[in-house]
Image (cartoon, grey):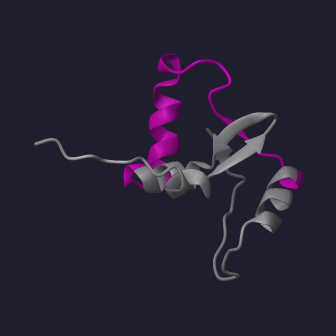
């Protein structure tokens, strides 16, 4: 028999943001989804730029990141050294 699987979009809703009128994910959230480190994901994308459309990934400005971060409930422990990419 067939097993019915209902997709629950709320599982990813917390990782999707609207930036520049586009739905995007932070590089760290996409890396978690694929089960890899963020730096590994970013490195793979940089090494394979020709496989992605132009504008596929861009770096957030400090202002946009601070605004986005204020909307995300996060721990005060740790943090990023560099502005994240959005994909």
Q: Position of residue 71 (x, y in %)?
A: 79, 64
Query: Along the horizontal axis of the image, is 37 left or right of 74?
Result: left
Q: Position of residue 36 (x, y in %)?
A: 39, 53
Does residue 24 lie above or below 32 as drawn? above
Residue drawn at x 51%, y 17% is 50
If the image is split into quadrants, where does the C terminus sit?
A: top right
- Is 60 magenta? The answer is yes
Q: Position of residue 85 (x, y in %)?
A: 66, 44
Q: Position of residue 9 (x, y in %)?
A: 52, 49
Residue drawn at x 78%, y 41% is 19
Query: Along the horizontal axis of the image, is 46 left or right of 71?
Result: left
The stretch in magenta equals: 34-63
Q: Residue furthest left?
A: 1
Residue drawn at x 84%, y 53% is 62
Does residue 48 lie above or below 38 as drawn? above
Q: Residue furthest right?
A: 63
Residue drawn at x 61%, y 58% is 14
If the image is split into quadrants, where does the N terminus sit?
A: top left
């Amino acid at each position: 028999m067939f097993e019915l699987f209902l997709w629950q979009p709320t599982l990813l809703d917390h990782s999707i943001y609207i930036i520049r009128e586009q739905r995007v994910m932070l590089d760290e959230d996409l890396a978690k989804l694929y089960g890899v480190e963020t730096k590994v994901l970013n490195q793979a994308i940089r090494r394979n730029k020709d496989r992605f459309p132009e504008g596929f990934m861009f770096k957030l400005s400090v202002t946009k990141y601070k605004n986005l971060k204020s909307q995300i409930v996060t721990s005060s422990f740790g943090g990023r050294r560099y502005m994240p990419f959005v994909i």
